Image: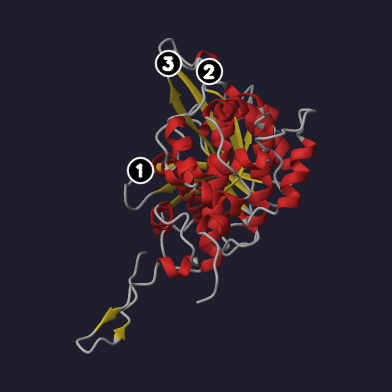
């Protein structure tokens, strides 16, 4: 059998150390750590994400028990106070930049989205993570609780988080949307919370397409009507000009599409600046936006983002960005191995085999059995998908 490093070592190899060190130098606080390096901190944080440690104490004690394995991943055990101090003081902007780098690597391996058009497809949304008001007073959200909001741009090629911004719970989605740079020709789907006519105009001028639902109080004038195929659920396909006080901030023609879902019988009205794709495709694009809700539910269920090992704003942001990096590393592991398993099952198997020396493929191979004569027979391959 060929020699293999631990599963954890193989995952960390997806992050080139020279790029890690370049980011570390760029985000340096001016004083180089003598004992507890930035890489060592990252190794500890990623371990806690992948294994779902219950607390800071639990995570540190678990790492100490694996002291012999840490040498091969370039780390060593650390005291709880030193680790907590690093999470509070070392800028989380480093992990934000690292997340962007890892996404760039992962996007080159991911499959394409399911539509026939070649434009990049994104979904934009935010999710709220509730916090205790007493433990996180800096994130005051309502009178009785605190919260942070994770604004995410999901790339439908592989369903990967392409952008993430972490703010307090009160920050409106539209403020973050204005700071995102979309590639020219890309399509972004968002719900009505992102309705900002000035932003829509900016997208039109930058050659970016949007797909959203129209607000019920929108004021507009129809300038053209097209015939539609009602068998596909499309009820109308119009070109409109926004005439309301706020709507006039977007002087560009807008396409308005009515659609009745054949399953729920609910009627939806979509607006877009894309006049080339069919009306049914526009409706399908918005329906595909549900994938970002599935993504939010996955990370909240499987990663450590609902309980935190530090109470400061910097510690919370650091933990959230490392969670997103963990998602990307798992995705890369899945793409490269080509094992037909779900991401959730992949994580569950990795959690209990993180320091096992074998290839990822070996984790999913059934154990050999012996017949009555003592000969080894291989079992049928199990399907974990």
Q: Residue at x 46, y 28 (%)?
A: 129
Asked whether the viewer can see residue 372, the reply is yes
For the residue pair 303 and 35, the one nearer the viewer reads as: 35
Residue annotated with mark 2: 139
Marks 3 and 2, how far apart at CA: 9 Å
Q: Secondary structure at mark 3?
A: loop
Q: Nearer the viewer, mark 1 or mark 2?
A: 2
Disc on the earlier residue, 3 or 2: 2
Residue annotated with mark 1: 266
Among all residues in the image, which is located at the extreme top?
143
Asked if the residue under mark 2 is in contact with the one under mark 1, i.e. CB atoms within 8 Å, the reply is: no
Asked if the residue under mark 1 is in contact with the one under mark 3, i.e. CB atoms within 8 Å, the reply is: no
For the residue pair 205 and 240, the one nearer the viewer reads as: 205
Specify the label residue 145 is tagged with: 3
| The C terminus sits in image quarter | bottom left
Asked whether the viewer can see residue 223, the reply is no
**38 vs 113: above or below:** above
Q: Residue at x 41, y 63 (%)?
A: 341
Disc on the earlier residue, 3 or 1: 3
């Amino acid at each position: 059998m060929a020699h293999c490093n631990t599963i954890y070592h193989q995952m960390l190899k997806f992050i080139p150390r020279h790029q890690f060190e370049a980011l570390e130098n760029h985000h340096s606080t001016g004083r180089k750590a003598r004992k507890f390096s930035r890489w060592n901190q990252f190794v500890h944080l990623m371990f806690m994400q992948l294994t779902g440690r219950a607390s800071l104490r639990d995570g540190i004690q678990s790492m100490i028990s694996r002291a012999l394995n840490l040498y091969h991943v370039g780390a060593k055990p650390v005291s709880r106070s030193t680790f907590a101090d690093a999470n509070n003081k070392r800028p989380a902007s480093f992990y934000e930049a690292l997340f962007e780098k890892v996404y760039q690597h992962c996007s080159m391996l991911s499959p394409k989205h399911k539509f026939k058009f070649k434009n990049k497809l994104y979904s934009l949304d935010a999710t709220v993570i509730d916090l205790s008001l007493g433990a996180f007073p800096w994130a005051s959200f309502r009178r009785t609780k605190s919260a942070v909001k994770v604004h995410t741009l999901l790339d439908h090629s592989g369903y990967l988080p392409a952008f993430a911004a972490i703010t307090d719970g009160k920050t409106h989605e539209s403020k973050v949307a204005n700071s995102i740079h979309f590639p020219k020709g890309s399509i972004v789907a968002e719900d009505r919370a992102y309705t900002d006519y000035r932003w829509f105009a900016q997208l039109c001028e930058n050659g970016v397409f949007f797909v959203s639902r129209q607000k019920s109080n929108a004021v507009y004038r129809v300038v053209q009507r097209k015939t539609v195929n009602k068998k596909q659920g499309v009820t109308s396909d119009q070109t409109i000009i926004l005439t309301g006080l706020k709507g006039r901030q977007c002087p560009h023609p807008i396409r308005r599409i009515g659609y009745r879902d054949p399953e729920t019988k609910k009627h939806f009205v979509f607006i877009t600046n894309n006049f080339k794709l069919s009306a049914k495709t526009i409706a399908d694009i918005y329906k595909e936006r549900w994938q970002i809700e599935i993504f939010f539910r996955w990370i909240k269920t499987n990663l450590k983002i609902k309980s935190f090992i530090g109470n400061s704003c910097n510690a919370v942001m650091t933990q959230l960005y490392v969670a997103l990096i963990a998602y990307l590393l798992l995705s890369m592991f899945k793409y490269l191995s080509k094992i037909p398993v779900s991401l959730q099952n992949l994580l569950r198997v990795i959690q209990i085999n993180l320091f096992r020396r074998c290839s990822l493929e070996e984790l999913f191979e059934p154990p050999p059995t012996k017949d009555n004569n003592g000969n080894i027979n291989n079992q049928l391959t199990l399907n974990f998908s």
